[in-house]
Image (tube, rainbow, N blue to C red):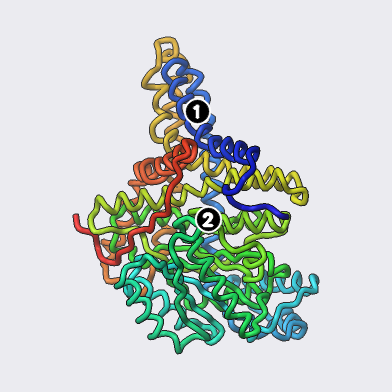
Amino acid sequence: MDFHYSKQHLTAGEARLQRRLEILPGAVSWISLVTLVLLSIFFPFTAAIFIVAFYLCWLLRLLYMTIFLVLSYMRLDIEQKTDWRARICGMDALRAYIENCGQKKFGRHGRRWFSHFVHRRELKKLSASGQLPPASKDILHLVIFPVIKEGADIIGPALEAIARQNFPTRQIMVIFALEERAKGPVKQDVSAVTQKYASHFKDCFTVLHPSGIPGESRVKGANVTCAAKAAAERLRQDHVPFEHVIVSCFDADTVVDQNYFACLTYHFMVTPDRQRASFQPIPVFHNNIWHVPGFARVIETGSSFCQLVEATNPEKLVTFSSHSMSFQALVEVGYWPVDMISDDSAIFWKCYIHYGGRYRVVPMYTTLSMDVACAETWWRTVKSVYKQKRRWAWGVENFPLVVRGFLKSKEIPLYEKIRHGFKLFEGHLSWATWAFILSIIGWLPVIFARKEFAASVVYYNIPDIASTIFNLAFLCLAICIILSMALLPKANVRFSRLKKAGLALEWLLVPVSMVFLSALPALDAQTRLMMGQYLEFWVTDKRRTPPAR
């Protein structure tokens, strides 16, 4: 569909609709919070009914998320032992490979049996589709690292991890998308790292993104788009078909698992409509996990948990942070948006609308690790985490564009428009309001209770209801603590078990962290969008040494 995924160059009618849709998320969030506060003061009985109902809905959702978090973690743990290279080689002779797979026996090895069962199911779908994959030796990986202020201590380990892949590195091309305005030492570090690792890959080079290009904002999407266009020219010169290229857009601090590209190649090959799919791994924040304050560890672990839960529902999955996709699709839709901060999710919506709803995200049960936001001091780390979460929450800027695209599209089914539109809107509304209601507003009816309400059955039962709900919530929290410990890097840890135990206790900071470092940044972002005060891209502070107090 011919839809310009941007808020620029709109007609007068489109501009009015765009502005109204920008106001909607923030307005609904503020109305919801203010209404509950006023009800708690003037009509505490009515507010108590609403809040108890909210608690119950929240508890059901929490239990649902916890169950699928556990299932997703189990799948991740199982697939970490998968030999992706062997599967790739087998798929090069697909019919014989399917027959051999059917003859395998696993005895009591239930974990291996489950992984093999899923694998056989995917192979059968691929065979039935008739859309056979290219040979594994013909697949090329294009990796783009945007750089603005990251030095060799950040980009060096990222490239080292790719050089040590359990996959032929001669089938990998690496590009550093370097901003022209980057400082001299950063440019020198990029040049040094490129020279050090160039011999490991098919190609490794730097593309300088000029500043001040008309129509572009100072955002990552403009930088990586410039690099992708340069890569397209080089691929054309080398006569490499775009449909054989998988592009991965990684943050500069992304350190991939050694099986990442083997796993990605497998999923690309086994997915029938592979040219209309993105591939989303599970992000973890382990690069500097032991060198940041406790609140930052808990917040980022929660982000990983959210992605684990989302991976269990591919029909609603949207790309987040570092991800991969077909290069042909990227070129066909016109690359990443060059005027939006939330390019990682925006590229999914851009593809989804362009292909009339025939685009999806394939979850990959493999990890890549990034940095927890960390600055020179504890207080600056607080501000860095806040700004990072506000930037993530700025993904709400997609809502008006998606709705306009849905209204214009005649190919996307109405049910899909409603389902995706509601999830996008409800997700941002929940992000900005739930923590406030749970931690603060939920107690207001009791505080402002009048005599007639204080003598009611509801008044006396609210504490018991809340206690039961929070006891069940604590059970979910305990499961999260156990999984967070299990997800921690297990090798080369220089800290004692007492230090690890301290991480478990840090989860008691969840109520405070969720209010001030999750809900508040989200409400801030929605309010700015509502008021027309648009954010500029802010690069997260990244350090791998402990901040000073």
| Residue 434 in the image, given as x and y percentages of width and height | 47, 38
| Residue 375 in the image, given as x and y percentages of width and height | 28, 58
Q: Residue at x 60, y 74 (%)?
A: 246
Query: Considering only vertical position in the picture, is 511 above or below 316?
Result: above
Q: Is residue 108 visible?
A: no
Q: Residues within 10 Å of mark 1 (few under 14, many from 20)?
A: few
| Residue 536 in the image, given as x and y percentages of width and height | 42, 51
The type of residue carrying mark 1 is Ile
Q: Where is mark 2, residue-wise?
A: 215
Query: Contact, CB < 8 Å: mark 1 with mark 2?
Result: no
Name the quarter where the N terminus is drawn.
Answer: bottom right
Name the quarter where the C terminus is drawn.
Answer: bottom left
Query: Considering only vertical position in the picture, is 28 above or below 233?
Result: above
Q: Secondary structure at mark 1?
A: helix
The type of residue carrying mark 2 is Gly
- Mark 1 or 2: the one toward you: 2
Which of 36 and 53 lies nearest the eye of the viewer?
36
Which of 493 and 223 lies nearest the eye of the viewer?
223
Q: Where is mark 1, residue-wise?
A: 31
Quarter of the rendering containing residue 138: bottom right
- How far apart are the alpha carbons under marks 1 and 2? 35 Å
| Residue 257 in the image, given as x and y percentages of width and height | 47, 74
231 to the left or right of 89: left
State which tag comes first along the sequence, 1 or 2.
1
